[in-house]
Image: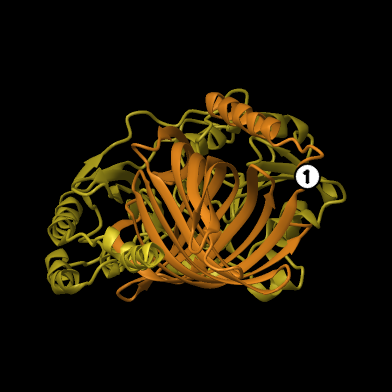
Amino acid sequence: MKNYKLIKYLFILLVINTSCSDLLIQPEDDTALKMEDFNAIRDIVEENYPYLDFKNIDWDEVYNEYLPRIANSKGDEYLNEIVSFLGELEDGHVGYQLKSGYVRTYDLPRVLEDKFTYKPELVRSYFDSELILTGNNHINYGKAADNIGYIRIETFDNEDRFWVHDIDQAFIDLKSTDGLIIDVRHNGGGCTCVANYVTRRFLNEPLKLPGVIRKGVFYEEEEPLTPHTPVPYENNVVVLINGVSFSATEVFARDMKTIDRVTLIGKTTAGGGGATQYFDLPSSAQIRLTFQNSLKYDKTPIEWNGITPDIVIEQSKDDVENGIDKQFEYAIQFLKDK
Amino acid sequence: MNRFITITFFLTIFQYGFSQETDKDKPQFSITLSTGLSQVALKDKTISSEKYSGSLTPISIVFNKEKENSSWRLYLNYSSGLPTNYNIKAELNDFNIGWDYSYNLKSFQLFGNHPTYLFGGFSPNLLVYYRKQNIAEPGQFLYAAKLLFNMSGNAGFYGYLTKKVSYNLTTHLNLFTYEIGVESEELDTQIVSQASTGFSTPIFRSAFSLNYELINGLKLGIGYNFKYVKHDELRMSSDSFLFSLTKKFGKS
């Protein structure tokens, strides 16, 4: 009898336990917090985003379109709606930051177009010896055929602000070359402070920067970009750019284009201009938003327009798959003929 | 971190010291393979506060060694599946590897004078939780991952209902945990680590199984496992129904 009682208790324990997983984790109703986040995003964009007029976006209309979608979204469908809402800005810099990761809200058309038209490994196949890797592995350099120097800068990120100083050794090693290629294709940007470090090494005179617009007000850059003396490289230079050259890389291309002995070759850059800032939302999430309109020298925005090359050289995914880097080959020939 | 490693090391040595074989001990080995169906419910606020639930497929392998007054088990459990929240799916992988050392604390007779043993001991174990979630468009994912090194206590009893049917009830409760996790902040992914006790971050597991001896040394079993993990912003609970096959080696 005692044994049957034990079995009975075990059975009851089993039945209770089988529904435990669902009972122990209860859903939370945070609809109000989600709406607070949504409204906060509306206000932050309205107050800070510099391109609403330029992009002809009626932000109130966008908000009203998304209001029922957000209100009716169930559970985490809300995350997708918020990403779509921010995606209406069509800005490669804008993102949604959660504790578990960063979500891009928009891919610029030229980024998508050129995504598979460049492979750094392919460039390496043009060299007889291994390229030298330096600057926290962000810089590759070497000497190509016909005594042409090559430096690839894969990012302008300033996570370790001193890595870019290693480029000075590359200039020393390549000083005797007849021309130099700076390859910033697929460079997704970073800090203009890093980009400026490189640009200054090619300037012969101070460069007055074109200024920025914040909250509708134009601000002159206080200080011009000053040349680094002595100029470490004085021969002709090609900067290779493409549709995945983005953000600070576009500022780099813009400024390099002003120098007479520098020629931009490749395709128009992505069109992501401007400084960004993280804004806190009522929940623990954040949004990353462009708050400053970075201008080109003709006072039009870099945003969407990008920096156009002096010489356009198309390059397709098929070219890359067939082992041909047309842009690199053209740059070598161009410098050789100069 | 160092303190955790030191304590785990000494407890492991301590247990090995007690588990040295003697000629008197005639060890029995068994290997159990099991699979079945799990129901999981979880909330991980590093992604969102929404509840995800659904079924997982668990598989498990256990190596068990029994001696006169003690036993140890090396086990490896893995579950994976796609729990959902409305139309949103998350890919979940849950992995647990551990080692139980148990002493027979008391024996008594139940169910027609069949022997029943009460046991208790320690269990260092590692729990790996990994969630990957597509968001907004194909190819964009959010990730949440945790590595939890636990020192748990185990207790339970096992015995026989009849000559051929045995049962086993085991519970584990963590005493302290050392976590290594991944967090993302402003485009940077960072590795974070922290230590906690079982009071602040309870991890509880219980398992009940019934085994029928088909032929000498080969057992067929059914079982139920329950697991609850509360750690920082993660709450996860699962019920699993398992079918198992156990092969015994060595003499009784």
Q: Residue at x 18, y 51 (%)?
A: A44
Q: Residue at x 73, y 57 (%)?
A: B252
Q: Residue at x 23, y 52 (%)?
A: A49
Q: Is residue A19 left or right of residue B15?
A: left
Let me know if residue A300 appears in the view: yes
Residue A307: x and y in percent read 46, 56
Q: Does residue A201 sit above or below A58 in this rendering? A: above
Relative to the observer, which residue lies in front, A15 or A234? A15
Relative to the observer, which residue lies in front, B95 or A166? B95
Q: Is residue A187 left or right of residue A142?
A: left
Relative to the observer, which residue lies in front, B104 or A120? B104
Coloration of the structure image: by chain
Type of the residue with mark 1: Leu
Residue B191: x and y in percent read 50, 39
Relative to the observer, which residue lies in front, B30 or A77? B30
Q: Residue at x 79, y 37 (%)?
A: B22
Q: Does residue A329 sit above or below B190 in this rendering? A: below
Q: Is residue A125 left or right of residue A314?
A: right
Q: The residue marked by circle 1 belongs to what chain?
A: A
Residue A217: x and y in percent read 19, 43
* Marker count (numbered): 1
The picture quadrant where one finds residue A234 is top right
What residue sits right under mark 1 in the picture?
A131
Residue A309: x and y in percent read 54, 59
Colour chain A appears in = yellow
Colour chain B appears in = orange
Let me know if residue A255 appears in the view: no
